[in-house]
Image: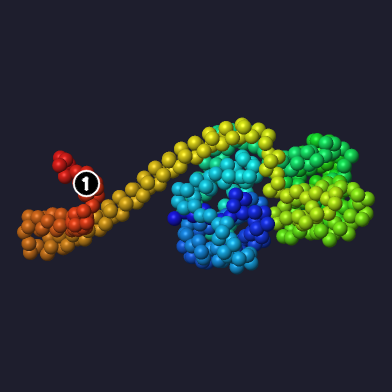
Amino acid sequence: MFIACGINYHKTPIELREKLVLDATSSAPFLKRLIKLNKNNEAVILSTCQRTEFYCTSSANEHLINTFAEHTKINAELIAEHWYEHQEINALKHAIRVASGLDSMILGEAQIFGQFKDAYKEACQLGSIKHSLKNIFPFVIRVSKKIREQSGIDKHAVSIASAAAKRILQSFKKLNDLQILVIGTGEIAELVTKYLAKEGAKNFLIASRTEENAQQLAQQYKAKPVPITSIAQLLPKVDIVITATACPYPFITQDLVLAVSKDTQERSIFFLDLALPRNVCETINQIPNMTVCNIDSLKSYCQANLIQRQQAAIIAEALIDEELTLYLRFTKSLESKKIIKNYRTMMQTIADKELTLALQRLNQGNDNTDDIVHKLAHRLVKKLTHIPTLTLKHAAREGHTDFLASLESLLNYESDH
């Protein structure tokens, strides 16, 4: 059984989602732990700013939730309130919608496709992919890529980074004189810097835990790399702070901002927190002239090409249904081939056993050849029809008329074969 389960932005607020993120350091140990719950289980973990999902081959919802709760130190009942589970074809459809960006907060966003592939790659490296998911995930990835290309949704995609730039532009009409502190040097931080530079921003300060990364990003945009430890000294001098780090806790706290606000001379600071877990305390909004926006507040700034993306999404949904129909047809053909193969193997085993007995009798030379051949034919008919006969009798006793009709059609005893 293929299962897709977890929590996402549809049902779970950011305050809880950030506590349930499995980052690069915690996802691998938890994946190994998940496999130990059931040695026959296969699993992939997808954890992003919008969702933490588990793709498995066995359903142990309560056990999984309890293990997840123990790992994250979050109450299991609270997780269960926001939990969802999809099975079999619905799980497959959900996985395709996720990987293709149809289930994203920003319809059609492209980053999730790479995140989905990375999650599968990590699971392969950790040995949690065996048989079922080894077939399912390449199918999901192939179909998702096809859907993004053929529906046109990738041509009109809007990213979190571009939405973040739009949010800043709504508050600041001109960027050329503003001091912008970017904390983090990952993909989102780099893209936001790129978009803002295109809109006229010139004065960037780049802070990173790794000095080399800060220098590399700073060189691209003629920015100034700064030590991440100097944030407190820099805050009174900047207008915008953009955070996008993997730090597991908010390092820009209300106390920190309160301490430096006396030096800001009533200067406004706009904090745009693109991280999950969040890097900036939401309570900073309570301080005069301070504004904090997080990733969940960006949805209303993703309206660009929305009509085109919605039209592409309709095409994409139709393509998903078409691909799932073909997939089901293919899997059913595999099931029938397996049944036929097993049935033929069973019949051949019976035939080989009876033939061996007949040849032994022939070699002994004590019986008439015609008698041996007739007995062989009689025993074969009796043994080969034994299980079908028992099945027919049972179906008749239970009144399974549809099954009997199917067997009659299958046996086709009136043919000339």
Using the image as rendered, state which of residue 156 and residue 167 is in the foreground: 167
Q: Which residue: 58% across, 65% down?
A: 76
Residue 154 location in percent, x, y? Answer: 62, 36
Mark 1: which amino acid?
Ala
Q: Which residue: 85% across, 59% down?
A: 256
Give left or right: position of 372 versus 117.
left
Q: Is residue 191 visible?
A: no
Name the image quarter holding residue 251: bottom right
Q: Is residue 343 visible?
A: yes
Q: For the C terminus, give its image quadrant.
A: top left
Residue 203 location in percent, x, y? Answer: 87, 42
Q: Element type at marker 1?
A: helix
Residue 376 location in percent, x, y? Answer: 13, 57
Residue underneath mark 1: 405
Give left or right: position of 252 versus 124.
right
Count of labels in the image: 1
Q: For the N terminus, give its image quadrant.
A: bottom left
- Would you place residue 258 above or below residue 189 in this image? below
Q: Which class describes the residues within 10 Å of circle 1: few (<14), some (14-19), or many (20+)?
A: few
Q: Which residue: 85% across, 51% down?
A: 288
Name the image quarter holding residue 227: bottom right
Residue 7 location in percent, x, y? Answer: 58, 55
